Amino acid sequence: MLKRGCLLSSTMEKIVAKLLVGNWKMNGVKLALQEADLIAAAAKTALGQSIQLAICPPATLLARLSEATAGTGLLTGAQDCHAKASGAHTGDISAAMVKDAGGHFVIVGHSERRADHGESSEMVRNKAQAALEAGLVPIVCVGETRAEREAGQAEAIVLSQVEGSVPETFPDGGLVIAYEPVWAIGTGLVPSAADVLAMHQAVHESLVSRFGAKGASIQILYGGSVNGQNAGDLLHLAHVDGALVGGASLTADGFLKILHAIQE
Ligand code: PEP
């Protein structure tokens, strides 16, 4: 069992203590805004404890959710954006559209998009760049498959995704990384605390070596089957600066259980 006390992140290096982002994926119609209202009610108190909450709903709900939660402390974001600013790209949305809809974040390079839409790290980097240019904070997702972990390649794969997906320049605090092992997403499986710690440490070191002090300030979220039971242990590990949460963020009850676990 890892000792919590010696694993706390250094507050000297990171701007906000914890960032908790809900990714609703392709779930939710207008009725789901009621869940967001309940989450928003908790957001101000959380902010007082340096815990920032955010929800990334489906694109159809982003503007309504942003309007409904404005001023509450709950931030919003999109789950993807196109790399181009405008044009003939049927079905896509641009980073400027996300911004116009009130979004603060945009998730780029989620493993479901890398798998379902063939997104390479280069494409993800271009999307992150577009997000930065629109004044959004990209949440750049990286993570190994089960086969890659079993082959002992997890760290090499993740570091190469970080290298390929993170643009060369970004403002201080203006970019977030989410480490999400593909095999842990939606499966109820979670890596050991030692494995999460080792990967976050490796990602942090690679960012410091590439970007210096600015790299040290990049928040690194963990994602993959986070819930109220495991959040307390995972989110107190060094360089685990928050969580990207799928299934457990769909209800206020599930999401706030995670918040309460990290407030303890
Ligand atoms: C995700 O898809 O970003 C995610 C972490 O999903 P879940 O929490 O459901 O594993």
Image (spheres, rainbow, N blue to C red):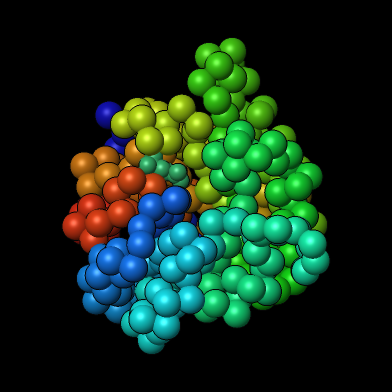
Determine the residue positioned at 33% across, 46% down.
Answer: 247
110 horizontally vs 90: left or right: left
Residue 135 lies, in percent from the top left, at 67, 75
Determine the residue positioned at 44% across, 51% down.
Answer: 26
142 horizontally vs 89: left or right: left
Q: Is residue 113 visible?
A: yes
Place residue 83 in its image quadrant: bottom right
Residue 253 lies, in percent from the top left, at 19, 57
Quadrant in which ligand 1 is drawn? top left
Place residue 260 in its image quadrant: bottom left
The relative height of residue 253 versus residue 63 in the rendered view (above or below) is above
Quadrant housing the C terminus: bottom left
Determine the residue positioned at 59% across, 13% down.
Answer: 151
The relative height of residue 3 versus residue 28 in the rendered view (above or below) is above
Q: Nearer the viewer, residue 256 or 236?
A: 256
Residue 54 lies, in percent from the top left, at 41, 66
Q: Residue furthest top?
A: 151
Residue 65 lies, in percent from the top left, at 40, 74
